[in-house]
């Protein structure tokens, strides 16, 4: 190169190599490039040297390091188009301009301020051979490098290229590591990694929240200590299988319900997903733990939200079907009391839908985001009732291998549905009364007094007043529960609702069985309306389900599944005037009776004449006949 005094070519070449190597061999990354460009420019005695990274989408070059006129230039970035660097990138080989570079590239805005005369650049490539940047030098005098000098320059370009690839790879790995770390730390599920001996090597913040232990305490501890004995034994067996490698090992497709023990001693049911992998010939296992209690609460909130509003944003009735006058009055009462925190007692025969109403009340309440926990007081064994209500401590009784929360704890902040509360044993009633009055209790075998804020919705099909008189139900508990009593009507009292419910169940079971069902005819409608339905809605659902499953050609044979014969049909419904006890009626009385009966049918169906849910179907006459009678009797809607 003309700018370097050369008397002995070989001596100069050796000097260049030694000079650059001595000043760059101990540097790495960005620091390497800062040192590289400085000593490259000094060794070649040129005005400037720089290393750039190609930003392909923007067609720009960003310098990793730029040395010019004895100092580093920071944040140097420029457009690639119309520059000598463009030739390096496009041709993917060395590009040399020995003299008059400004004249060759007059549109390059930087050459003139840099007082550039000559230029030489080499491309940098990634491991796949794609151009990712370049190394260049420029001078304010002409450059005439020899072949050997170009080779030396190229040698150090290759060293810079290798470091560039290493730097990019390191940056990519660090970026992936940060992304993975952010992902692990942001997921709501607990993640615990262990080695093949069971020592925890990695945890995320969700694991800290789930277990109650700090991250520092978790890392390095044995995974088995966080689980109940049976769950811990399962994990021991799993890790043994990993070490054996010959036995099958569960993967992410396999989910196992385990029981984790919180730092406070509570037992937490979790759904565990397991996977294994190997790093440097060492096996690792990762557990992803999902809190089933929290998951159930989340699912319930979603279910309540879905039920609370229809697609148009209007409130829904959460599975309650019916628009008979008795049901409309009940729904009005329900909506008035639901938003309060008052205790509600649902009264009604079996099958009238008490659980459905409990869900609807909770859905409308201020507590809807919290869980509604159900307790069937008739289904819990006598010796476990207290434990189910209030929970127990580890070792409180035989089989109590860990601490468990009771239903009151699970319902804290939400509501507790005491179904069949009339079946509650007498010895348990004072303890329930205390929770209702004071909001506090002790777990079985525990010493601490726990406080909860729970709304009570109770239900029974028994006469609690009679039970109080007989001494089988505490009077004070009865009055505590009977704050707002709501009586659910019998199905036979709901008139046309029977047809609405039947149509709902027909559609439901038709979808479930895949069997199309024809619309009900007049005979089927009469069968449904004349049957007394002692089992209420539950019985209706079972009858429809059997009829749909055993239907032929889409035709329902309801009579086959109703437990009465034709003579019973004729006498099962008694007239309000008890015609059986009337010996003779005048024509005027019969006419008035018919008029009253038609008016009642019209009111029950909201003056809907035709259709399976209309008044004509309820009366068992054609719609045309009903229209004629309405005119003859001059019947009108009461609100007109």
Image (spheres, helix red, strand yellow):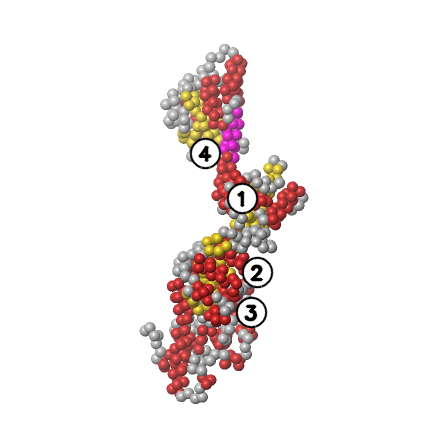
Q: CA distance from mark 2 to mark 1?
A: 38 Å
- On screen, 18 above or below 423? above
What mark, if any, has residue 56 been given in the picture?
Answer: 4
Looking at the rendered structure, the secondary structure element under dot 3 is: helix
Residue on which disc 2 sits: 383
**Closer to the camera, 561 or 391?**
391
Q: Is residue 110 left or right of residue 214?
A: left
Looking at the rendered structure, the secondary structure element under dot 1 is: strand
Q: Specify the segment rendered in magenta.
A: 156-173
Question: Mark 3 or 4 closer to N-term?
Answer: 4
What mark, if any, has residue 191 been given in the picture?
Answer: 1
Q: CA distance from mark 2 to mark 4?
A: 75 Å
Q: Nearer the viewer, mark 2 or mark 3?
A: 2
Q: CA distance from mark 3 to mark 4?
A: 70 Å
Question: Mark 2 or 4 closer to N-term?
Answer: 4
Residue 615, x across and y down, in percent: 42, 75
Question: Mark 1 or 3 closer to N-term?
Answer: 1
Q: CA distance from mark 2 to mark 3?
A: 38 Å
Residue 619, x across and y down, in percent: 44, 78
Crowding around mark 3 (Cα neighbors within 10 Å: few <14, some 14 to 19, many 20+) is some
Looking at the rendered structure, the secondary structure element under dot 4 is: loop
Residue 625, x across and y down, in percent: 41, 79
């Amino acid at each position: 190169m003309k700018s370097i005094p050369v008397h002995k070519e070989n001596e100069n070449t050796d000097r260049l190599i030694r000079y650059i190597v001595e000043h760059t061999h101990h540097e790495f990354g960005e620091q390497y490039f800062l040192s590289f460009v400085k000593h490259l420019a000094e060794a070649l005695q040129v005005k400037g040297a720089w290393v750039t990274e190609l930003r392909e989408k923007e067609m720009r070059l960003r310098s990793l390091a730029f040395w010019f006129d004895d100092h580093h230039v920071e944040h140097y970035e420029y457009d690639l188009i119309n520059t000598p660097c463009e030739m390096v990138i496009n041709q993917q080989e060395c590009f040399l301009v020995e003299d008059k570079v400004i004249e060759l590239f007059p549109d390059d805005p930087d050459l003139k301020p840099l007082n550039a005369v000559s230029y030489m650049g080499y491309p940098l490539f990634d491991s796949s051979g794609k151009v990712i940047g370049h190394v260049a030098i420029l001078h304010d005098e002409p450059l005439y490098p020899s072949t050997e000098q170009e080779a030396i320059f190229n040698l150090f370009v290759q060293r810079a290229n290798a470091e560039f690839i290493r730097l990019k790879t390191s940056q990519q790995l660090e970026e992936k590591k940060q992304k993975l770390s952010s992902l692990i730390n942001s997921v709501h599920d607990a993640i615990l990694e262990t080695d093949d001996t069971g020592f925890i090597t990695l945890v995320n913040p969700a694991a800290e929240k789930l277990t109650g232990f700090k991250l520092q305490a978790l890392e390095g501890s044995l995974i088995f200590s966080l689980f109940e004995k049976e769950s811990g034994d399962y994990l021991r067996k799993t890790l043994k299988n990993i070490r054996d490698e010959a036995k099958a090992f569960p993967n992410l497709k396999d989910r196992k319900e385990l029981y984790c023990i919180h730092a406070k001693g509570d037992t937490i049911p979790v759904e565990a997903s397991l996977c294994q992998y190997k790093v440097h010939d060492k096996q690792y296992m990762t557990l992803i733990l999902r809190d089933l209690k929290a998951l159930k609460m989340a699912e319930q909130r979603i279910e309540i939200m879905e039920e609370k509003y229809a697609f148009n944003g209007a409130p829904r009735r959460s599975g309650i079907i019916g628009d008979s006058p008795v049901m409309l009055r009940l729904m009005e009462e329900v909506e008035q009391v639901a938003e309060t925190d008052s205790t509600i007692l649902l009264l009604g025969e079996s099958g009238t839908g008490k659980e459905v109403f409990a869900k609807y009340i909770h859905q409308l309440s201020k507590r809807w985001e919290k869980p509604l926990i159900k307790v069937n007081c008739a289904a819990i064994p006598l010796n476990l009732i207290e434990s189910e209500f209030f929970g127990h401590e580890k070792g409180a009784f035989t089989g109590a291998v860990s601490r468990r929360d009771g239903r009151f704890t699970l319902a804290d902040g939400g509501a507790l549905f005491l179904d069949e509360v009339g079946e509650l044993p007498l010895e348990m009633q004072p303890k329930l009364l205390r929770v209702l009055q004071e909001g506090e209790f002790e777990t079985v075998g525990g010493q601490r007094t726990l406080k909860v804020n729970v709304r009570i919705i109770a239900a029974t099909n028994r006469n609690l007043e009679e039970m109080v008189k007989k001494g089988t139900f505490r009077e004070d508990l009865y009055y505590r529960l009977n704050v707002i009593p709501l009586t659910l009507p019998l199905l036979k009292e709901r008139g046309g609702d029977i047809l609405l419910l039947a149509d709902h169940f027909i559609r439901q079971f038709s979808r479930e069985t895949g069997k199309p069902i024809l619309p009900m005819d007049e005979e089927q409608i009469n069968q449904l309306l004349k049957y007394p339905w002692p089992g209420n809605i539950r019985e209706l659902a079972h009858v429809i389900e059997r009829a749909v499953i055993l239907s032929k050609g889409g035709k329902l044979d309801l009579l086959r599944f109703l437990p009465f014969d034709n003579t019973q049909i004729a006498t099962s419904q008694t007239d309000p005037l008890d015609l059986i006890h009337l010996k003779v009626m005048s024509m005027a009385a019969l006419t008035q009776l018919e008029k009253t009966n038609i008016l009642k049918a019209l009111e029950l169906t909201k003056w809907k004449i035709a259709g399976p849910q209309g008044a004509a179907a309820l009366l068992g006459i054609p719609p045309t006949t009903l229209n004629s009678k309405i005119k003859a009797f001059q019947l009108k809607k009461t609100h007109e």
